[in-house]
Image (tube, helix red, strand yellow):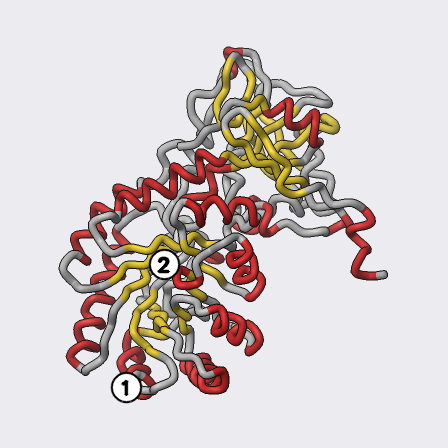
């Protein structure tokens, strides 16, 4: 699953004791495992190896340029949703031809930047966006490729905020409209509308919604080909689950085992946009206990806050939390919502932000901790740092990359001067 494991009661990131990182860098700090990133990417690449496949890692999941660089070196393309993510991907050495660009609200400036970069595909979310892309492509003298995003009206049964493939969302066009979009715009000479894109949402935990969506899309592709349109690629998006709980999500091989047979022999390039399935288990957020507070409940107050990791508040997300140093009897053998060992105590783990919603866990069993102890918040690599903010004028945490027995500071902790530097 990942390379964060306990040895003699101490938590290690690969071969580095995380206490050593905290002593040198401070807390809160995001700690990334390079080996975990690479292993999860390679598992996906291998699983779909029978098909002509481009794996486009989703930059929005975890976008530090140092991480994007080694993913690009390992053969990954990139899924982007903004001009800033395009800039990051290119600066990291990403191949423009392996970049796909999604998002319902691309600005003219962002589109022109992507046109001039020569990206692989624009994922088109509406007729209005396609009309604008055609206009700008003519203006810039470019002929980009585009994929029409289809909303297959399939619910992957995740959180309402991460569901994007049902009819009532803002994303894509419904299947019934797709043929008309191609009829109206598919023969234009400025934009090659030659692919279909779907994305059901994030944090999927079953394979069947993807199978159902692909079957629907394949029917559409056959119809479009009969109508005279060349469809060269299908982008089945991301949203593949990650193990927030041990054994929670299907593996890359599980997904591919159901998906590859559907696409074999269809003369289609396959594009994947995994984010959390590569990044989630590749990081922890390490935080220090500031205070213990007892009353009706017992609170463990730590120095990380909702501004550092907003997923528990925003998505009601579960993150396994455990001390970075424990007696051997407390060393966990799994990451489970209901893990209760003898002599643990039930607490709320909360941060210092002035909001009642500033929590990481409620009614969670933990070994006894004291002021100064380190807690690890696991599976923090996806939508952790990328969603962090300066709420309460709090400085963004540091980011550290571990590679075997070495660690490198890949983003310095923000300072107070940094907080106001653009206001001067």
- Residue, x 43% and y 32% (percent of image)? 2
Q: Residue furthest right?
A: 424
SS class, disc 1: helix
Q: Position of residue 47 (x, y in %)?
A: 26, 44
For residue 237, the mark is: 2
* Residue 16 higher or lower than 212, as above or below: above
Q: How many residues crowd mark 1 within 10 Å: few (<14), some (14–19), many (20+)?
A: some
Q: From this viewpoint, is residue 361 visible?
A: no
Q: Nearer the viewer, residue 60 or 205?
A: 60
Q: Position of residue 252 (x, y in %)?
A: 31, 43
Q: How many marks do you count on the picture?
A: 2
For residue 134, the mark is: none
- Residue, x 41% and y 39% (percent of image)? 38
Quadrant position of the N terminus in the picture: top left
Quadrant position of the C terminus in the picture: bottom right
Q: Position of residue 152 (x, y in %)?
A: 31, 67
- Left of 190 or right of it: where is 254? left
- Residue, x 70% and y 27% (percent of image)? 24
Task: Please name the residue that numbered disc 1 is placed on.
Answer: 183
Q: Which quadrant of the figure has residue 188?
A: bottom left
| Mark closest to the chain's N terminus, 2 or 1 | 1
Q: How many residues crowd mark 2 within 10 Å: few (<14), some (14–19), many (20+)?
A: many
- Left of 286 or right of it: where is 203? left
């Amino acid at each position: 699953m990942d390379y964060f494991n306990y040895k003699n009661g101490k938590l290690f990131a690969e071969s580095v004791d995380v206490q050593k990182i905290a002593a040198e860098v401070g807390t809160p700090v995001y700690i990334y495992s390079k080996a975990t990133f690479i292993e999860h990417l390679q598992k996906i690449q291998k699983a779909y190896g029978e098909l002509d496949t481009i794996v486009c890692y989703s930059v929005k999941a975890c976008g530090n340029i140092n991480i994007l660089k080694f993913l690009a070196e390992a053969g990954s393309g990139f899924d982007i949703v903004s001009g800033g993510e395009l800039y990051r991907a290119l600066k990291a050495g990403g191949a423009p031809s392996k970049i796909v660009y999604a998002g319902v609200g691309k600005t003219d400036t962002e589109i022109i930047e992507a046109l001039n970069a020569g990206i692989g595909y624009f994922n088109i979310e509406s007729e209005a966006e396609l009309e604008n892309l055609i206009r700008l492509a003519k203006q810039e003298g470019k002929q980009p490729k585009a994929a029409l995003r289809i909303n297959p009206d399939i619910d992957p049964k995740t959180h309402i905020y991460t569901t994007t493939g049902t009819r009532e969302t803002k994303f894509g066009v419904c299947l019934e409209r797709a043929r008309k979009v191609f009829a109206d715009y598919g023969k234009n000479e400025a934009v090659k509308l030659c692919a279909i894109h779907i994305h059901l949402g994030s944090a999927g935990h079953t394979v069947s919604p993807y199978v159902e969506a692909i079957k629907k899309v394949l029917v559409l592709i056959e119809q479009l080909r009969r109508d005279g349109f060349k469809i060269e690629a299908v982008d089945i998006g991301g949203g593949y689950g990650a193990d927030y709980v041990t054994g929670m999500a299907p593996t890359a091989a599980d997904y591919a085992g159901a998906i590859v047979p559907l696409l074999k022999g269809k003369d289609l390039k396959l594009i994947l946009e995994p984010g959390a399935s590569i990044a989630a288990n590749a990081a922890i957020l390490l935080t220090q206990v500031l205070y213990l507070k007892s009353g009706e409940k017992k609170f463990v107050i730590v120095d990380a806050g909702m501004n550092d990791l907003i997923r528990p508040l925003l998505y009601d997300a579960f993150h396994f939390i455990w001390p970075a140093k424990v007696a051997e009897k407390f060393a966990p053998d799994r990451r489970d919502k209901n893990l209760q060992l003898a002599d643990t105590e039930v607490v709320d783990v909360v941060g210092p932000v002035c909001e009642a919603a500033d929590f990481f866990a409620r009614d969670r069993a933990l070994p006894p901790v004291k002021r100064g102890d380190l807690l690890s918040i696991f599976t923090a690599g996806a939508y952790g740092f990328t969603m962090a903010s300066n709420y309460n004028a709090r400085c963004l945490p540091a980011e550290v990359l571990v590679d075997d027995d070495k660690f490198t500071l890949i983003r310095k902790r923000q300072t107070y001067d940094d907080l106001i530097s653009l206001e001067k």
